[in-house]
Amino acid sequence: MKKILLLTILPFLMFAQGPGPCVPILININLDQYPSETNWDIKDNYGSIVLSGGPYDSVPSYQPQMIMNCLPVGQFTFTIYDQYGDGLQGSLWGGNDGSYYVIQCGDTLVYGNVPDFGTDSTHMLMSDTCIPPPPIPGCMDEDYLEFDPAATVDNGSCFTLKIYGCTDSTMFNYDSLANHLDFVDQCDYTLILKDLLGNAWIGSYLEIRQGDTAYQFQMDSLGPEQHFDIVLDAPEPFEVEFFVVQQASGTTIECGFEIINPIGNTIIDIPPTQLDAFVVYPGFAYCGDGCESYILGCLDTAAVNWNFYANTSDSSCYYLPGCTSPAYLDYHVDTTNNIFRDYHVQDSCLVLAMFGCMDSLAFNYDSLANVDNGGCLPVVTGCMDAFAFNYNSNANTPDTCIQIIYGCMSSIAFNYDSLANTDDGSCIEFIYGCTDSTMFNFNPLANADDSGCTPFILGCTDPSMFNYDVLTNTEDFSCIPFLYGCMDSNALNYDSTANTDNESCIEIVVGCMDQSAYNYNSYANFDDSFSCLFDANCISGPGNPYWLNDDCYAWVIDVDEYCCDVEWDEICQLTYNYCDSTYVGPLPKRFINKKLISITDILGRPSNIIKNKLLFYLYDDGTVERKIKL
């Protein structure tokens, strides 16, 4: 047995960073199976590192790192790093995930319970002075029933002094004055260390902690098991933790342990392949109490049959000598209580012992027996025919037999036989379905119709086709593919072959598309050549009817240039009406006493206009009009 007192004092490393206290802090890094990838630091507001740790190259996988230190009051940042970039997510590679926490004054400042943080994870924390917990009033004296282990201030509530004793009224030493059961305060437990390959633990060890005491055990012998005795206080909790050194990290799977209490019951059993390193396994030690059961017997030490172990008299004491031969009845006076006369004289042996069952109601009752041999058998009535349905192998008295009737005995089966008493394995389950072979969903395996038959419905069953019918269940090869296009017959791009509108329709805009026309429409996409209007460049300007492509207007200004060059007067309009048949005549005449003159008469000199053979009319009012080209 190895016993180590845990008297470890964890020092606080102090560092100067301005005035104020350095408040204790705990950094807890629970490593995964790749400890050499992990490191961390704590920085102040200036980015200076004030605390750091890792990478943990020389520690075994999963070993928790508990770093005690202190920080001054103020704001800091905690950052954890992973060189590989998978955080502490060991489960990605078949292991266990890690975690990290920063704790101060009993308060968790950083919760690092998300292992997949990649290459790093930063948390802001605020270091502050510890606020003392509020006092907890209560009884602080363990000798009183009102004792409160959580109390920090005695409030005078201790009233009832503990009186230890047996409080079980069914026990021999029951104490009616006792108010607290007197437990056995310690006992021996058995610890079994196990190794799957039997090659010892190579430096790893098991630690059992109870209160301020710790025991460490290491399997240092070859073989599958090694046994140890360990004394545990009771009734008290304890805990077990398995520690692994780096060189034994790969052999953890081989280790296991078992703890057995004094009466042979296993209270903790962690077999090899299931033992996790650095995991705390809780247990509770119980060594029994001081209560004693009743033990009947003769309490008189002067009697022949005095019982050293008895504590309660059963009035069985006897003092006279008697028969010492077990072959005689006189020897078996008190066999009921396992008391035999063993200090008698032979002269008292008179009647031979006849062993047998002396119970007249028993199956094997023996009327000649005078000493019960304890072998009486009860009467068991039943069918004794091994080929009957209700055959009873324990029966010793015949009763009614029932014939075996084979069949299906399951009431939920299709072929259930209510008369059967022995199942022959022939049960057929109900298979519900359509039993009509003319239906679409006919099920040839069904033996019970579910009234759900569906007729054949022909149509297109392909959801990707234009005429797919969700109600059809049978393909008739009528599927039509989707043809996308404009389906508006009034649209410019109407597609008569399309069956699915793709919202591409273009509205028809009718108009003149001749850019030389006066009313050219840049928005038009359908040419209305008849609507185009062309300016004749007459003095009247554009407008009805002054369009060059108006045949009547073109004719009027051709025969009467006055209408174009001077003005559009009543003669012009009547001439126009004559052309479009809204005026029947006579055709008006504009000229009075006109005469044909040459250009020289007008200009007083020859001109190339004469070469073009233009004729002019000279009017009485002195105006000159060009007529036509000869």
Image (spheres, rainbow, N blue to C red):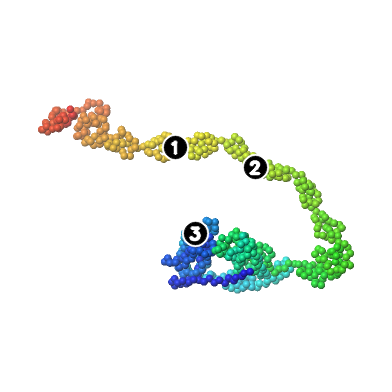
Residue type at mark 3? Answer: Gly
**Residue 172 against residue 437 in the figure, above or below:** below
Q: CA distance from mark 3 to mark 1?
A: 55 Å
Q: Residue at x 71, y 68 (%)?
A: 291
Disc ID at residue 430? 2
Mark toward the viewer: 3 or 1? 3
Residue nearest the observer in this picture, 178 or 434: 434
Q: Is residue 360 left or right of residue 100?
A: right
Disc ID at residue 350? none
Disc ID at residue 87? 3
Residue nearest the observer in this picture, 591 or 270: 270
Q: Is residue 532 left or right of residue 60?
A: left
Residue at far left of view: 604
> Considering the numbered disc 3 on the image, is that residue within a helix, a strand or a loop?
loop
Badge 2 density bin: few <14, some 14–19, many ≥20, Cα 10 Å: some
Residue nearest the observer in this picture, 128 or 202: 202
Q: Earlier in the sequence, mark 3 or mark 1?
A: 3
Residue nearest the observer in this picture, 39 or 405: 39
Disc ID at residue 483? 1
Residue 73 at x, y percent in the picture: 46, 69
Q: Earlier in the sequence, mark 2 or mark 3?
A: 3
Residue type at mark 2? Answer: Phe
Badge 1 density bin: few <14, some 14–19, many ≥20, Cα 10 Å: some
Residue 130 at x, y percent in the picture: 50, 70
**Residue 403 against residue 177 in the figure, above or below:** above
Q: Is residue 418 visible?
A: no
Q: Residue at x 68, y 63 (%)?
A: 264
Residue type at mark 1? Answer: Leu
> Considering the numbered disc 2 on the image, is that residue within a helix, a strand or a loop?
loop
Q: Is residue 361 left or right of residue 2?
A: right
Q: CA distance from mark 2 to mark 3?
A: 56 Å
